[in-house]
Structure formats: structure tokens, C-alpha cells
Image (cartoon, rainbow, N blue to C red):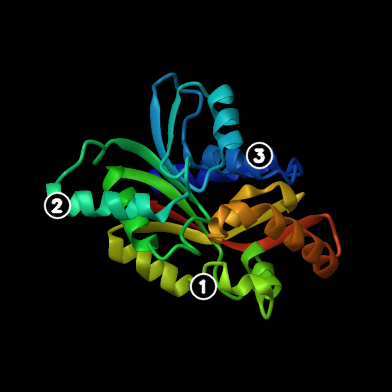
Amino acid sequence: MQFTLFFCFLVGIIASYAGERTGNLDDEQVELVSYTVSDLSSPKQTKILTLGLIESAITKLNRLYPQLDIIALDSTTYSSHLFKHLSNLWKSEGPIAWENQYDAIVIYLALEKNPYREQKLRIMYKALKPGKQGIIICAPKGIRSMDYWIEHFVEDSEWKSFVSNTPNLSPEDYRTLIQNIGFHIVYEGKWLSVLRNVDTFDWIGNRWAVPLPMQSRFTGDFYRFLRTAYGDETCWFPDIYRFVVEK
């Protein structure tokens, strides 16, 4: 019954957003959080733990829904070292202050290029309250995602030695990873991502672990490559994968 109501809510939200995609990354992430929280009209505070949300998306969410308490675990540095530290802290000192404290989790393309993705996901699982849900957006290997084009861009280029070589997983491997952590998958399917002006996206360099002093040139070079290869300012990625999970 709970999943049926949740699914009906998703259908309603999707219908309300039809034809309104701006192509801005922050608007897409606002939309994603709107999918995740079942009652945005409630005055009750809702705590959300996120991975992969950019600062401007969080700012918009705070303005639109002041009752949301959004914590972006990676918002400052996007550093894998943070997750390694927190994972070690969990192992050495037992339960930590935010275990079972969050009403929802949102992960947006944050499991792909970082070698500590299992630790990231485990921390998110520990933080979520039992019985609560979240959404994980993934870019499986081989599909036409931003990562697909970056892989072609860096291949046989000067950038290959500077970027992350952690491979994206298949949908089956993402499913296994998510379930092995302890999540129950209540729904899975495709997510339509529509993005433009990718030269302004710092998250590309961050996700691919490009050294900070080189990120501006990397992103500019990639954007020029993408316009030539893709042939349009707006990129449509219909095969991004979405998992609705529950603890």
C-alpha cells in the first residue's frame, strides 16, 4: 500500500513537470528531490541527506521548501577522503550521531567515478531511518550519459592520466551493490536527464577527479568536444537509471 501511494505520487509529479525541463542541472536536481519527498506541503521538518547535489540546487530547495533540512555530505570538497574517514569512524567507534536520523536520501550520479562508492552508499544507508525511502540516480556503463561522452573525450588524449579510471557499473551490478548494502529496491527504471551549457558544470571535473587547477580547461575542452560530437547545445540522456530504495 505504501509503495502504491508513493508510486502514484511519482506519476503525479512527473505529469506536473512534463514539458517544463529547463536543462539546468540545479533544476533537474530540485525536480529529483521533489520526486523523493512524499509531502512537500507538510510543515513538519524533513531531514534529507544527499550526495551529488550542487550548491545552487540546495539553495533553490531551501527557498522553495523551507521545511526541508538538506545536508549535502559532499557539498564542500566532493572528496572521497571524507567518506573514507567517516567509514573508518563508524568501524572504530560504533554508532555515530546521525545514524537512523534522516527521512530521505538522494544520490545523484555520485557512485560512478569514485573508488569509495561502497563506503559512500553504506554511510547513506546507516543515516536513513528504518522504513524510509530514497532515490539513487546512476549512469550505467555503455549508455549515452555524460560519462559516456567523457570516456570518448579522454580516450587517447592528454587527459587520460589525470582523470578517474574507476569504471561505471552495469545496472545489474548497481542493483547488487545496493542490495548488498542492505537496501530494499522498491522500484527501478529509466530517468530522463536533459542538460545544457555543460561548460558551467563544476561537477564534471569533480566527479571525474580532475585536479582543481586543471578543471576549467578540462571542462572547456570537453564542452567543445561535446558540441561537435553531440551536435546540439542541449543533451538528452533517456537511459539514466533510477532506483527507489527503502531501508
Quarter of the image where one finds residue 232: bottom right
Give the CA separation, mark 1 to mark 2.
Answer: 30 Å
The residue lying toward the viewer, choosing from 38 and 59, is 59
Q: What amino acid is labelled 1 in the image? A: Asn
Secondary structure under tag 3 reads helix
Secondary structure under tag 2 reads helix
Secondary structure under tag 1 reads loop
The residue lying toward the viewer, choosing from 236 and 188, is 236
Give the CA separation, mark 3 to mark 2.
Answer: 39 Å
x and y, in percent, of residue 245 in the image: 39, 53
N-terminal label among 1 and 3: 3
x and y, in percent, of residue 218 in the image: 68, 60
User: Could you tell me which residue is drawn at 60 percent across and 40 percent down?
Assistant: 31
x and y, in percent, of residue 14 in the image: 63, 44
The residue lying toward the viewer, choosing from 175 and 94, is 94
Disc nearest the viewer among 1 and 3: 1
User: Could you tell me which residue is drawn at 39 percent across and 61 percent down?
Assistant: 117
Q: Can see residue 12?
A: no
Looking at the image, the residue that sits furthest to the front is: 213
Q: What amino acid is labelled 3 in the image? A: Asp
Give the CA separation, mark 1 to mark 3.
Answer: 29 Å
N-terminal label among 1 and 2: 2
- Residue where numbered disc 2 is placed: 92
Q: Quadrant of the N terminus?
A: top left
- Residue where numbered disc 3 is placed: 27
- Residue where numbered disc 1 is placed: 165
